[in-house]
């Protein structure tokens, strides 16, 4: 439980689920999203993990680390072909992935947009038959299934929560939580989008959540929503507001936040608190999704 006069004045209780402590090398939601993908890759006798991401992608770093740890080769298709011949401009994320053995292939933004198309996926699988292909952000049905463990932990550790707040990249973590948590009508999962307002993710989120014939009957469709920042921050951009949020949170609670995801999530929480979005007696869980390798990210516009 996080103790603060601000929370006492608002008559709320605030907790942080420290999922950044769940795995020594593949921390946070990335471990949940990758674990069943790793199992399936082994079962299919694949030798390489192949995936996609931007220059600041925690998923790229996590996949490279997982591949090294579990005996796979790894390949990352990275958005931004201007980086191909300029390794000196690579982000810490890319450098770390490369040091962990990941082969980096840089795509133009036009080609990168094709990553989810069936023809592109088919050609990629033909070119790399020994590769297990994981979508951007590690977000697929196996990832959604992997989040059941996290949902169960939350249900057991703090069953009477009213609001659960998480950062949102691709939407898979939010989807997996909504799908697996034992929620009632008084509980809401709130997502702070790290890229724009998050509206473009709603189709994928609804598909992942409703990949269960009983979902509509059992769950309130209003039990999740986006909690948008007052001034949306471009993905990978570290602003003075983000830096201040990191500094103040660490000073008050001795907890380190990454600048790409968790600091944005916490900033969104404080903005909502300042607007009295949380009724008295609310029990709020802030989900720390890890990504602390992002602390080394360069302060610049995203590639």
Image (cartoon, rainbow, N blue to C red):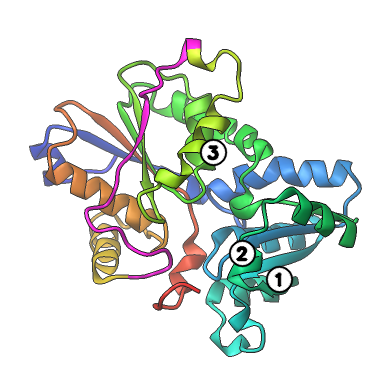
Rendered residue at 65%/41% (across/down): 140
- Choose between 287 and 76: the one closer to the eye: 76
Q: Is residue 23 visible?
A: no
Q: Which element is circle 3 on?
A: helix
Nearer to me, 91 or 119: 119
Residue on which disc 1 sits: 100
Asked if the magenta segment contains residue 227, the reply would be yes
Crowding at dot 1, Cα within 10 Å, few <14 / some 14-19 / many 20+, comes out as many
Could you say where residue 162 lies in the image, as x and y percent from the top left?
A: 30, 26
In the image: residue 124, left or right of residue 266: right
Q: Are marks 2 and 1 in contact (CB under 8 Å)?
A: yes
* Nearer to us: label 3 or label 2: 3
**Residue in the image at 47% along x and 49% along y:** 289
Q: Earlier in the sequence, mark 2 or mark 1?
A: 2
Q: From which residue to which does the magenta span run?
A: 217-238
Mark 2 sits on what residue? 61
- Between 95 and 105, the one lying in front of the other is 105
Q: Quadrant of residue 82?
A: bottom right
Determine the secondary structure under disc 2.
helix
Image coordinates for residue 117, horizontal then vertical, percent: 70, 51
**Secondary structure of residue under mark 1:** loop
Q: Which residue is identified by label 3? A: 204
Mark 3 neighbour class, 10 Å CA radius: few under 14, some 14 to 19, many 20 or more: some
The reply to whether dot 3 and dot 1 touch (C-beta < 8 Å) is: no
In the rendered picture of this protein, how many numbered marks are placed on residues? Answer: 3
Comes first in the chain, label 3 or label 1: 1
Q: Earlier in the sequence, mark 3 or mark 2?
A: 2
Q: Position of residue 186 (x, y in %)?
A: 30, 19
Magenta segment, principal secondary structure?
loop
- Residue 189's quadrant in the figure? top left
Which one is closest to the eye, mark 3 or mark 1?
3
Q: Is residue 70 visible?
A: yes
């Amino acid at each position: 439980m996080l103790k603060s006069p601000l929370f006492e004045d608002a008559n709320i209780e605030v907790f942080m689920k420290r999922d950044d402590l769940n795995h020594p090398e593949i921390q946070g939601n990335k471990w949940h999203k990758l674990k069943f993908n790793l199992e399936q890759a082994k079962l299919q006798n694949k030798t390489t993990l192949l995936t996609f991401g931007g220059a600041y992608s925690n998923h790229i770093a996590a996949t490279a680390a997982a591949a090294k740890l579990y005996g796979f080769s790894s390949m990352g298709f990275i958005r931004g072909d201007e980086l191909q011949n300029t390794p000196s401009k690579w982000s810490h994320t890319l450098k770390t992935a490369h040091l962990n053995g990941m082969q980096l292939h840089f795509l133009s933004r036009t080609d990168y947009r094709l990553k989810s198309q069936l023809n592109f996926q088919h050609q990629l699988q033909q070119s790399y038959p020994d590769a297990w292909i994981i979508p951007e952000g590690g977000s697929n049905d196996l990832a959604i299934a992997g989040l059941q463990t996290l949902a169960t932990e939350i249900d057991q550790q703090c069953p009477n929560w009213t609001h659960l707040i998480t950062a949102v990249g691709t939407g898979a973590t939010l989807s997996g939580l909504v799908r697996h948590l034992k929620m009632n009508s008084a509980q809401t999962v709130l997502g702070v989008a790290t890229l724009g307002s998050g509206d473009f993710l709603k189709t994928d989120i609804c598909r992942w959540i409703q990949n269960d014939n009983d979902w509509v009957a059992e769950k309130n469709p209003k039990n999740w929503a986006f909690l948008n920042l007052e001034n949306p921050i471009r993905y990978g951009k570290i602003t003075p507001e983000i830096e201040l949020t990191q500094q103040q949170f660490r000073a008050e609670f001795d907890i380190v936040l990454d600048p790409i995801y968790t600091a944005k999530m916490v900033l969104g929480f404080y903005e909502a608190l300042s607007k009295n979005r949380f009724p008295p007696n609310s029990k709020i869980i802030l989900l720390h999704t890890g990504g602390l390798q992002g602390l080394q990210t360069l302060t610049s516009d995203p590639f």
